[in-house]
Amino acid sequence: MGIPIPIIGWSDQRRKSNYASFQSLQALGYQSLGFTVWILSYLVIVILASIVLLVMLGPATTDNENLQPWVVVLLIVMFGPLVIYFLLPILAAAACALGRDFRYPVMGQRLARYLDYDPARAADEQTWLVEEHEFRWVAAMGHFSILILFWGMLAPLTAWALYGKRSPFLRFQSVQTLGYQAGATVLAFAALFMYLFGALLFIAWTGVMGASNLDSSMGILSIVVFGVFLLLSFLIILLTPLLHVLGQWAGYRLLKGDDYRYPVLGKLVDKWLFSRRQ
């Protein structure tokens, strides 16, 4: 629910409170873009820490007393970033409850400049946030949320439901993103299904024939079928990161001011929306 709630808060507070709108958009950025940066950084940290520990410990280390400090260090490296990730929004919620202008590290100041948000500006000089950049930020966060399997689709779906009729730009980007994420999600589940289905067929055949008959024609066939399903699953798994990278690229291009369209899908969505307007 961390994905749709900030969009709902932003939609409700637009042109009512710059403070509430900014904090909602900032929370949306942390839940989507922040999650993307965090998960990628987390993987790099864990891999590098594991390699460093293995090199420092060496294969000959068997003393439990020597291992214990390193195990503690490894646990801190693995779970420390996770604690920090959840701690920051808790601090943000507390700060907002006290009426303070909380900013996430790195992202907060950049977003404030992007939206032209300045709480120190005099009341008679106060203007609303830049509307185009608001819409672009919401649309881009929908693209970035592709890493959040299945639940990431809530971002474009919520934006489409709330602002689909008010902003043609946000409507197109939301529908396009929703279709793209749905396709990526289906592929991920298809890879899992192929692997499990092939494994079940292999187990069923070996159970019926017995392990001693694996060198028979049916046994070889079961191995071949399982290998085909395993290969198809592996190919889809290799394709998934490329789809995620393209989603991140789409979000980046929107923030840079482009009207990004996915190959093929963009034209299909454009035609579908045009037919609905007729």
Image (tube, rainbow, N blue to C red):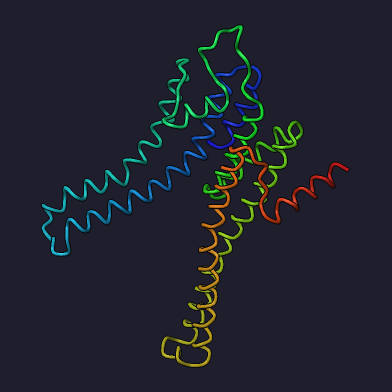
Q: Position of residue 153 (x, y in %)?
A: 61, 45
| Res. 1 visible in picture | no
The quarter of the image holding the N terminus is: top right
Q: Position of residue 89 (x, y in %)?
A: 44, 30
Name, please, the residue furthest toward the right: 278
Q: Position of residue 271 (x, y in %)?
A: 80, 50
Q: Compared with residue 213, is residue 263 higher up or lower down, i.e. above or below?
A: above
Q: How many marks?
A: 0
Q: Quadrant of residue 122?
A: top right
| Res. 132 visible in picture | yes
Q: Compared with residue 248, is residue 60 higher up or lower down, i.e. above or below?
A: below
Q: Quadrant of residue 125?
A: top right
Q: Residue at x 66, y 19 (%)?
A: 15
Viewer-proximal residue among 212 and 118: 118
Q: Residue at x 65, y 46 (%)?
A: 177
Q: Is residue 128 left or right of residue 206?
A: right
Q: Compared with residue 8, is residue 178 higher up or lower down, i.e. above or below?
A: below
The quarter of the image holding the C terminus is: top right
